[in-house]
Each structure stands twice: as C-alpha cells, then as structure tokens.
Amino acid sequence: MRIVRQVAPTTRQALRIIRERLGENAVILSSRRTAQGVEITAGAEVAAGPEFTELAPEAAVAPATAPAPRAPVAELVVAPVAAPAPDPVMAGPPPAADTVGQELKTLRCMLETQLAQLAWSDLTRRLPVHAELLRELSEMGLARDLAERVVQQLAEGVDLAQARRFAFTALAQYLQVAGERWAEEGGRLAFIGTTGVGKTTSLAKIAVRWALRHGGRGLALVAADSTRMGATDELRALGQLLGSTVHVPEQFSDLPALLAQLAHYRMVLIDTPGASLRDAKFASRLAVLANCASQLDCVLVLSANTQAAALEEVVRRFEPAHPKCALLTKLDEAASLGGSLSVLIRSQLRLCHVSDGQRVPEDLRPARALDLVSRAVALARDSGASADEDLLRRRFGKVSHAPA
C-alpha cells in the first residue's frame, strides 16, 4: 500500500495529481482545508515504490493557467470523499469536494430508487395479494408502518377477500375505544384541543344527552373559554335551556378552586380555550390542567379533516395534560380517515365518541372500532382514492420490508 498526501489550491487539481501518481484505483482516505487550499490523503496498491510517501506543504502545486478537464467521479474515487467543514471566515463558491459529495448522494439516491423498484416488482410477482392489500391500505391513507404491520401477518395462501377481512379486523383491534364511561356515573370532563375542532359543540351534545337521561340539576357547565367571542354566552344559553348551573372563572388558573366548589355535582363539563400550539399561554394552561389531573378527565378533541402530521403534533403537544381519551369530530367533512386512525393507533389514545354533524345531540355517537374502520374503507372507495406505482415503490419497495 502506497499512501500520499497532496496539497493543492483546489480539490480538482489535488485529485488530478493523485490520479497521475497512484493510478485509477486510488482510494481517498481523508480531506481537509488548509491555508494553502486543500489537503487530500490517498492510498493505492502499487507494484513497487515506498510503503509511505508524504508530500510536505511546500510541495503544493501552483494553480494551472487553464482548468483541467473534470474526470468522472467513478474514475477518481472508490470510497466516498469526506466533504471539508465549512469555514465561516472564507467566502466564495463551494469547494469541489462538496460538489463531489453531493454527486455521490445523488448517485446513492438513484441506486436506492432502482432497488426499490426491483423490490416492489418482485413483491407483486411473488405475493400479489400482499401487494394489492398494501395498495388498498395506502388508498385509505393509513400510515406505512401500520400497513406493513398488518400485511406482514398475512399467510401466503390467502386470497384477497380473506386478506381484506383480516386487515380490517386487525385495524379494529389496534384501535382502542373507551365507550360511554360517563353516561351513567357522570364525571368531570375538560374538553381540550386546538381552535375550531368542535370542543363547545361536543360539550353541548354530551350535556344534552346527560340532561335527557338524568335531568339538568346534577349538571354543571364551566365556561373557561374567555378568548373566543361569544363562547361564554353560548354556554349560558345552553345552561338556561337545560336548567343547569353555569360557572365562569375569572382566570383559567382559578379552575382547581372552582372544581372543589363543584364536588357535589354528578357531571361537570368544562369548555377550555381553543389553543394555538404557538400561543404564549399554551404551556401555562397545560400546567393548570396537569395539576387538576386527579380531579378531572381531559378529553382531547381531534378533527378528522386535519392532516395526519398535524394531528400527531397536537397529540404530542397536549400530552402534558394527560388526556384520558379522544373525541373525533367532523367525520362528515373528512376526505380520508386513514390518517386519523393511524394517529390514534400509534398514540394508543382511547377513542370515546365520534361526531359527524352539527345536530345536537343526534350527531354524536359512542366510538365503535369496526364501524370506524368500515367507514374509512367506504370513504376511500367512494372518493376514488388511488395510489400510483411510484408512491407504492417509495413506500414499500424495500427488501427489508417485503414479506418473505
């Protein structure tokens, strides 16, 4: 092995000289920026010559009058070139080593794309039922990891109808539901969530259902939303209609003391402000709810017409409030339910109710896992959702993910 260290004003000149000295099979060992330009250390197996040769910095090559022609990357290097760290003091165009590194990344991306295409083609040939089910789950909007989790449990000999029944049953088992746990015993519920997801409307539906079954005397409404115009008036009108008391705390931080005063009510429903995740008061409100965790159950209200990534962020940001369950609204406005199902399954958040309209209280129902999965399937079919081959290759065209 012969190792040389070459110093040159530019990376291109250093690579050209290394190629002339060591030949086509030179391997770049390291590179770094120096005061003279760039220093590259390379090695190669040669028939004769010293085992180790090092050029001193004084041997730096002067800039050529005309730029040398650029050789293909495959002829210059065998191992990836480590791009030098950017120097904040120096200004000017990016060094050639950065360009070489970017080209290597591009080549790697192209290679992975080709391998993904081959892997997906092999999967569709060997296990066409598995591939078709992956397609249908993607059309539902289900997350990639959940689709793979379901399909990997399929046996090789099943037909498509059996595979569909298995997949939908598995999804229903993954989705946890809470049921109407407060319908008879009552409780203290705080409806939390972002703005516009239907917290006040959901509270009104549950309040009316309780009043129709138990009367309004044992029901107390807490209008803690002081940010939305008219929110307090809405709850006062609802309380007057149901014959229930309505309490308005001066500040949100007064909520723990107010809950202690309402201990004799069987059902207490709390309307909280619609939170913007970037609001400066968001963290303080979560802290108040967290301190009341032993006195109430937080119900996280999620909108089904929200993108899955946004739902994941909402669940993560409201985690300090320790929500006991979730309520899914606006099913009638959603174009797909796969994203909502994926978020609920991943977070292991129990679903208590679903809402698909504005009617009070008709458009609120207890959550049923299999009904929700069936609705997601029907919605994908009726909307004509489709997943093209390129999307399927990128999502599932990996050898490590292909069923054996």
Image (spheres, helix red, strand yellow):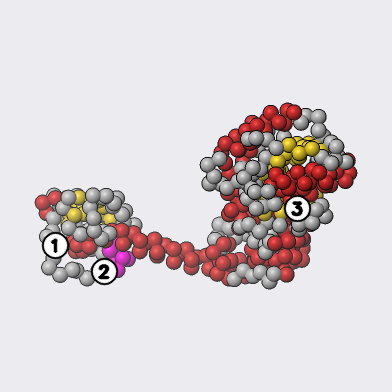
Occupied quadrant, residue 264: top right
Q: Earlier in the sequence, mark 2 or mark 1?
A: 1
Is residue 82 shown left or right of residue 378?
left
Occupied quadrant, residue 340: bottom right
- Report if the CB atoms under discs 2 and 3 are less than 8 Å apart: no
Q: Which mark is residue 71?
A: 2
Residue 245: x and y in percent read: 79, 37
Alpha carbon distance from label 2 to label 3: 63 Å
| Bounds of the magenta segment | 71-79
Residue matched to label 1: 63
| Residue in view at x 67 percent, y 64 percent | 335
The reply to whether residue 268 is in sight is yes
Residue 376: x and y in percent read: 72, 61
Element at label 2: loop
Rendered-image quadrant of the C terminus: bottom right
| Residue in view at x 81 percent, y 33 percent | 265
Q: In terms of depth relative to the viewer, which is nearer, 147 or 250?
A: 250
Q: Amino acid at mark 3?
A: Val
Q: Residues within 10 Å of mark 3 (few under 14, many from 20)?
A: many
Q: In terms of depth relative to the viewer, which is nearer, 137 or 191?
A: 191
Is residue 169 shown left or right of residue 25?
right
| Residue in view at x 68 percent, y 56 percent | 304
The reply to whether residue 191 is in sight is no
Element at label 3: strand
Q: Earlier in the sequence, mark 2 or mark 3?
A: 2
- Report if the CB atoms under discs 2 and 1 are less than 8 Å apart: no
Foreground mark, 2 or 3, reads 3
| Residue in view at x 26 percent, y 52 percent | 31
Residue 355: x and y in percent read: 75, 54
Q: Amino acid at mark 1?
A: Pro
Q: Which mark is residue 354?
A: 3
Q: Is residue 238 magenta?
A: no
